[in-house]
Structure formats: C-alpha cells, structure tokens
Image (cartoon, grey):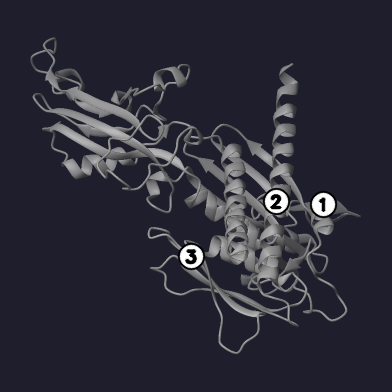
C-alpha cells in the first residue's frame, strides 16, 4: 500500500517518472496486489474494500454506478383524467421518480424515433402501468369527526395503487415476479371527494445520464483508508487528549510499564477531522495521510437490483465501452 | 471513413499535417471522464508513450479529445489498442475477484444457519 499526503491526486507511477524504477503496466503484479474484501452486504446496502487499483479506474466504477447502469422507470404518462389539485406535469414528474422493481436486463432500449415516432412500444421494451383511483366520502364516518382518514376513502394516493398491465407475452414471461414499485408507501398525490386520477404509464429502459430517475443507486461513493501514524510516543494526559481528537475507537490507551500510552488501533473508523492540528502540543506528534490505492466503497441500492449485482453490471459496462472502441478501431483499420 | 447517411461517428482521428503517425488526436464521441481518465491511466503505463492526455472540449458536448504521442515511429493506434485491451482485462479480473468474494461472503453468512 502506498501512503500519500492529502493533496496529491494524480498518479506518479508511470514509467520514467522515477529513474531506475520500471513502472510499466504489469498484469501479474496487479493481480498479485489486487484484492477485494466485502465488509457488509444485504439487500439494499453494500460496503466493500478495493485495494491495489488506481483512482482513475475506481472513480470510473463509481461514475458508472451513478449514471450508466440502466434501469426501468416511468417515462410516458398518458393522463386520461386528473381532477386532483396536483398539476399534470407535476404528477408526471413525481411518477417518473418512483422506482419500479423490474429487472432491466430483461428489457431492451426503445429505438429512438426511426420509422414511427409515436409507436406505442412493444412488450420487449415497455412496461405498462395503470393508476386509476377516485376519492369519495366515507358513508360510515361519524358526524363530527375531523380526521381525513375517517372522513374520506382513497384520499391518499400511494405507489401501491399503481397496477401492472401486462402487454403481449409479459404475463407468461413474468409469471412468478410481479412488476410493481419497489416501495408501496410512496405518497404520490392527495385527493378529496369527487377528485379522481386515471393515468396510464409507460416504463422504458434508460440510464442516469439521461435523467436521474434512471439511476439505480441511492448513492454510490468511496473514501480512501486513512493512514494515522504516531511520530513520537504520546503518554499520560496528552494521550487522553489525543484519543478525544479522533473518532471513537481509532486510538486506544494502553498500560505500558505503569504509564498510559496511546496506540492507533483502527484507522478505518476515523473521519479525518484533523482536530489534532488545533492543539499545539499534539500537531507534530501525528502524521495523517491516506492510502492512495485503498478504496472503501459504499453502494446503496434503490431496491431495483441488489447492490452486488449493480457493481458487476457497472464493471461490465466499462468492459463494453472498451470493446466498442476496439471494434471501431478494427473496422476502420480494415478499410 | 465511409458512412451511411444516418451513421454517427464514434471515433475520429485528427492528425496534423507533417507530423508522423505517432502523434494523433482521437475524438471519442459520447464519452467523458469515465472512460477518458481510466484509459489515460492505462496508456500512460505503457512503455514508449511520450505524451498521453485527454480534454473535454466543452461540457455541453459529450466528446473528448484524446491525444497520444509515441516515441519512435510507432503508430499511435497501437498504444490506444493495447490500452483498451488492458483496461478490458483489468475489468475482467476485477469482475472475477468481486464475484468470487461475494459468493464466499454469502456462503459464510449461510453457515451459522445450517
């Protein structure tokens, strides 16, 4: 692991930078030093470490997770009746942001306006959803109640009211998995008696670069592992103050020959607040840096795909990009 | 490059007159820092590359100018091709390692339940 002080971002490990040291790309060396450690994994969040890779490639994975892994989201909203207080375009915008639990790998992109621009879309690239709800007065409510939950029926439109309308052979293909929003308690609109919503929605496949509603992650981020080294032994009362300068669990006070000595136990827990620099007697005792090639990734999925599937799809997207340019190079060479 | 009416360019080569084959600016369409920076890193690690850099000409246009200058008379398409191949191999290795570790983690999680 190569430690570097905060501030240096660009690589210095290209061949010729350090005399007498060959930094040319060596796949064997990379494969020997590279490792991935999974720290936490469940259906919605994942934390894992990627060690031995450069920031350029780690950042490429992060950017792809945010913007280039495709998902299905509501794109076209056909409003047949909207007498609610929510305007048509606001309603359509809110519907687009509802995450739809449909595996995007089973669908194709909709071809952009080739022959017929107003084509309804086929079963291979579109999911049709319907939202049809009408608010009415509750006949069984007591005379003097003021609670809208008692007075009205269907006055809150939730995402659980969105129903899937299978087109073509989708009913057979998706027989065991129901296509619906990921969460069924997203409030879309509020109604009062007499108001109704009658809306047909088409979901298409898209990427986050086009519109943020297509992004499959709540967020995906990484941080670098901090490197905390004590340059001199810190004892007694100074050790107690040093312990308070860092996040809890980073520094431990140990009993060595009757004296209390500070020791760095787990630098991973630190948030690098650099509080120790504010104390004149402690600022020269610690060196704070980061390991430049140790990335702690946190991937939070919106629920459409599990986070480990998202990371594998992101890596595949980068591979596809490379292959596309390779085949482009080959085709121009042949001419 | 022969193109049909509708075909959009994906990769173009721009060469200054009088310069040899080793100094070429490639224009990659529909790309940004995601591929640009990672490809630049892989090509910088290649031997015999004097200069390698990329620019996003204007943030409203999604294309990058990718410049490679090689030492000697090596055509610039060679380090580009080897950089793309190596980046693809790195991705493959990362993918294999990641999937193996995820399966290991899931198996370890199921053990206490058995």
Q: Is residue A227 left or right of residue A214?
A: right
A12 is higher (above) or lower (below) than A215: below
Closest to the observer, B87 or A89 = B87
Of discs 2 and 3, which sits in the foreground? 3
Cβ atoms at labels 2 and 3 below 8 Å apart: no
Label 3 sits on residue? B2
Q: Quadrant of residue B104?
A: top right
Tell whether A88 sits left or right of A222.
left
* Residue topped by disc 1: A254
- Callout 1 crowding tier (Cα within 10 Å): few <14, some 14–19, many ≥20: some
Comparing B74 with A126, the one in front is: B74
Residue at x-position 88% and y-position 54%: A258
Which is more foreground, mark 3 or mark 1?
3
Q: Nearer the viewer, residue A160 or A324?
A: A324
Residue under label 2, please give it.
A50
Q: Position of residue A20 (x, y in %)?
A: 88, 79
Label 3: element kind:
loop
How much space separates mark 3 and mark 1, taking CA atoms?
Answer: 74 Å
Regarding mark 2 in the picture, which secondary structure is present there?
strand
Chain of the residue on which disc 2 is drawn: A
Residues marked 2 and 3, same chain:
no
At x 27% / y 33%, what residue is drawn? A201
Q: Is residue A138 above or below residue A297?
A: above
Closer to viewer: mark 1 or mark 2: 2
């Amino acid at each position: 692991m190569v430690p570097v002080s905060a501030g240096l971002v660009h690589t210095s490990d290209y061949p010729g930078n350090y005399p007498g040291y060959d930094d040319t790309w060596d796949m064997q060396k990379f494969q020997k030093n590279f490792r991935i450690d999974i720290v936490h994994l469940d259906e919605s969040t994942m934390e894992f470490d990627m060690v031995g890779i450069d920031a350029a490639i780690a950042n490429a994975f992060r950017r792809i997770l945010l913007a280039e892994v495709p998902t299905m989201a509501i794109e076209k909203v056909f409003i047949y009746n909207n007498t609610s207080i929510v305007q048509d375009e606001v309603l359509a915008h809110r519907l687009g942001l509802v995450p739809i639990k449909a595996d995007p790998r089973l669908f194709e992109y909709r071809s952009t306006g080739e022959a017929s621009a107003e084509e309804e879309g086929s079963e291979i690239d579109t999911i049709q959803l319907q939202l049809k709800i009408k608010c009415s007065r509750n006949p069984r409510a007591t005379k003097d109640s003021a609670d809208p939950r008692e007075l009205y029926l269907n006055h809150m439109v939730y995402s659980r009211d969105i129903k899937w309308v299978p087109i073509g052979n989708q009913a057979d293909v998706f027989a065991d998995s129901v296509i619906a929003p990921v969460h069924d308690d997203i409030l879309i609109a509020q109604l009062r008696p007499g108001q109704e919503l009658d809306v047909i929605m088409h979901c298409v496949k898209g990427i986050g670069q086009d519109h943020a509603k297509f992004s499959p992650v709540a967020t995906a981020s990484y941080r670098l592992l901090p490197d905390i080294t004590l340059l001199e032994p810190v004892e007694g009362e100074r050790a107690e103050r040093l312990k308070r300068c860092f996040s809890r669990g980073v520094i431990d006070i140990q009993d060595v020959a009757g004296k209390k000595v500070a020791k760095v136990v787990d630098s991973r827990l630190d948030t690098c607040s650099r509080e120790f620099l504010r104390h004149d007697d402690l600022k020269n005792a610690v060196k704070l840096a980061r390991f430049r090639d140790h990335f702690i990734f946190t991937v939070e999925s919106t629920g459409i795909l599990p986070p480990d599937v998202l990371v594998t799809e992101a890596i595949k997207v980068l591979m596809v990009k490379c292959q596309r340019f390779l085949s482009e190079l080959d085709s121009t060479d042949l001419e | 490059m022969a193109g049909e009416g509708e075909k959009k360019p994906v990769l173009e080569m721009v060469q200054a007159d009088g310069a040899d084959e080793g100094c070429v600016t490639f224009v990659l369409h529909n790309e940004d820092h995601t591929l640009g920076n990672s490809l630049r890193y892989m090509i910088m690690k290649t031997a015999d590359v004097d200069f390698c850099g990329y620019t996003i000409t204007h943030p409203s246009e999604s294309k990058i100018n990718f410049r490679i200058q090689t030492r000697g008379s090596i055509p610039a398409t060679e380090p580009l091709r080897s950089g793309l191949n190596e980046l693809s191999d790195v991705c493959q290795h990362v993918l294999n390692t990641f999937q193996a570790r995820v399966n290991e983690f899931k198996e370890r999680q199921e053990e206490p339940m058995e």
